[in-house]
Image (cartoon, coloured by chain):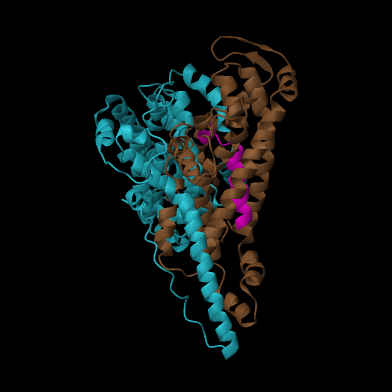
Amino acid sequence: MTPLIGAARPRRGERLSNTAFALLLTLPGMALFAAIVCYPLIASLVTGFFEQSLVLPGRSFVGLSNYREALQGDFWPVLRQTAVFTLGATAIPFVLGFALALALNSGIRGSGFLRGLFLFPWVIPGVVVSFLWMWIFNANYGVLNGVLTRLGLIEESVGWLGEPGTAMLAVIVTKSWASFPWIMVMMLAALQTVPRELHEAAAVDGSGAIRRFFTVTWPGVRGVAAIAILLEFIWNFQHFDTIYVLTGGGPAGSTETFAVAVYREAFHGFDLGRATALGGLWMVLLLGLVGLYLRMFERETDR
Amino acid sequence: MSAMDTVTPAVRPAKGGPPAPPAPAPVKRRRRADQRRSSVAAWAAVGVIGLFGLLPVYWMLVTALSPDDRAFRFPPDLFPRAVTLEHFRAFAENEALFRYMLNSVVVASITAVLSVVVSAYMGYSFSKFRYRGRTSLMNFVLASQMFPQALLLITLYAVFSEFGLLNTYAALILSFTTFTMPLCVWMLKGIFDTVPDALLEAAAIDGASRWRTLHTIVAPLAAPGMVAAGLFAFVRGWNDFIFALTLADRDTQTLPPGLVNTYIGEFQTSWPALMAASLIVSLPVVIAFTFLQRYLVGGLTAGAVKS
C-alpha cells in the first residue's frame, strides 16, 4: 500500500496538514472512546483503592485492603469458575463449529442454505438464548427431563440449573449453542481458501481422508482457527448475559464468573471497592489475552 | 422468514460428490468409495450437530404456539396437539412490552446512524492517511471492545448519573455507539481501502477539497457498506443486555432487560408467552442477517460482532 497518497495532500489554501486532517476525522470517535471507555475504566480501577458505596456519597482511601480481601476470598473460586466456563464454552463450540464447517465444505448439496439456517442461535439476542434454555432445563416441565425420562435414562427430574453439580454444565451448553455458528462461519471461510487441487493431488497420491486433513486442511486453516479460538476465549472470559439470566451466578455461587461477580458486588451489594478490586484483577488477566490477540491479528492481516 | 424456516431443515439425501478427474482405475475405485464415505460422514455431522442446533429452535416455536394448559404438563408433548396464536396476540396487546419495543427501535436506530457517521470518518482516516500513532489508534479501537464492560459500567453509571443522563435514551445511545464502533470502523475501513487512490487524486486535481472528496465522491461509493455497518450496529443495540439493564429504567429500557423484568422471577413464568415474545424479538435480527450474510466474514476477523 502506498504511504500517504497524493489525493490527500493539502492543496494550496487548505490550512490543515494531512496529519491534522486525519486526526480531526478520528476526533468524534476518540472523544466517545475517551468518555465511555477510557475514563470509566481508569476511574473504576482507582476506585479499587477506596471504600465506596454505590448509594452513599463520599469514600475513603484504604490502600490495598480491597485487593487483599479479594485475593483471600472471592478471587480464586471465581477464577476457577471463569476458567471452567471459558474453556468449556470455547472448546465445545470450536469442535462443533469446525466439524460442521468441514461437512458443509465437502460439497454436499444445500450447504449455503444450511449455513444460513445454522446462524440462528448466534444472531438472536443473548437473553432469548437464555430464556429458551431455561425452559429446556426447567426442573418441572422441561423438555430435557421429559425426553430423558421417556428414554428411561433418569428416574427423577433433574433441576439442571438449581444444583451446583449440573448448573455450570448447563451454562456451558447454553453458551456453546449460541457460539458454534460463529466458529462455523469463520472456519468455513478459512476452508474455502484451501485449494481443492491440493486435496485432489494428495488423494491421487493415495492419502486417506484423515491424512489429508492433517497434511492439507489443517495447515491451511490453522491461522484462522487460532484467531477464532482466542477471540471466543476472550469473549467467554468476560461473558455476562447468559449466565446472569440463567443462574445469576448461583446456585451457591457455583456459576459465578468475573463478569457476574463484579456486577453483583457493585449493583446488588453496592460495594464498589470490592467490585472494582476484583475487576482490577480480572482486567490484568484480560489485558494479557487482548495483547496476544492484537499480535496475532497483526500477523494474520495486512494493513 | 427464516426464523420459521428453521423448524424444518430441508435435508436431502446425499448424492455423490463432484465428478472425479481421470485417474488410474484402482485409484479411481478407491477414490469413489472414499468420497462416498466422506459424504456419509458429512451428512452424519450435519445431522447430529443440526439436531443440537435446531431442536431448541423447534421447541421454542412449539412452546410459543401451545396453549398454557398444554405447555405445563410432564412429560411434555413433543409434537403440538393444539395450536394457538394467543401468546402472540397477548404480546401485541401488552402496553409495557410495546413501550420496551418502542425504546428498542428508537435507541437501536439512532445508534445505527450515529455509529456509521462517526465510524466512517475514523475508518476513512485509517484507510487513506498515514501518520504517526495510526497503528496504535487502530489497535486501541480493536482492543476497546474487549475491555470488561461490567467493570467500566461501575463508573459509567456514576458519570451518567452526574450529568443527569441516567435512565435516558442518551445514555444507551452513547454506550451502544461506542461499543459498536470497533466493528463499524473496521468494516468501513475495509470498504474505503477498495476505493482507488487514483480517484481521490483526480478529485484533488479537479479542485475538490478533502472534505468535498470524502462527502461527494467517496461516501456514495461506500454507501452499501455503510448500510451494512448500520445494520450491524442496529442489531448490536437491539441485542444488548448489560447496558440497558443498568443504565435505563422501566421507561427507557429496551426489550432484552424488559423481557427479563416482565417474565423472569415471577412465581410462575408463562413459558409459552415468553417463547412467543422471544420469537418476536428475534425476528428483526434474523431479517437483518439475511441481508448481512455476505458481509459476515470480513467483519468477523476483526473480532467485532458479538455481545
Q: Residue A197, image x and y in percent?
A: 56, 77
Residue B163 placement, left or right of A80: left
Q: Main secondary structure of the magenta part?
A: helix
Residue A68 lies, with reference to residue B172, above or below; the image says: above
Q: What's drawn in magenta, residue-wise?
A: A225-243
Quadrant in which the N terminus of chain A is drawn: bottom right
Name, please, the residue furthest toward the bottom: B24
Quarter occupied by the C terminus of chain A: bottom right
Q: Position of residue B242 (x, y in %)?
A: 49, 30
Quarter of the rendering containing residue A79: top right
The front one of A164 and B231 is A164
Nearer to us in this view, B258 or B140: B258
Q: Tell me which residue sits at (49%, 41%) in the image.
A: A149
Location of residue B254 with respect to B184 vertically, above or below: above
How many discs appear?
A: 0
| Residue B93 position (above or below residue A289) | above
Is A43 inside the magenta-drawn segment? no
Residue B140 at least partly seen: no
A94 lies left or right of B277: right
Magenta segment includes A237? yes
Q: Which chain is brown?
A: A
Q: Could you tell me residue A26's position as x and y percent?
A: 50, 41
Q: Residue at x 44, y 70 (%)?
A: B14
What x and y, as percent, mark residue A91? 62, 49
The foreground one among B51 and A209 is B51
Q: Colour of chain B?
A: cyan
In front of the other: B77 or A78: B77
Residue at point 59% right, 88% down? B26
Q: Quadrant of residue A198?
A: bottom right
Instruction: Please indicate, yes or no, whether residue A300 appears anywhere in the rendered image.
Output: yes
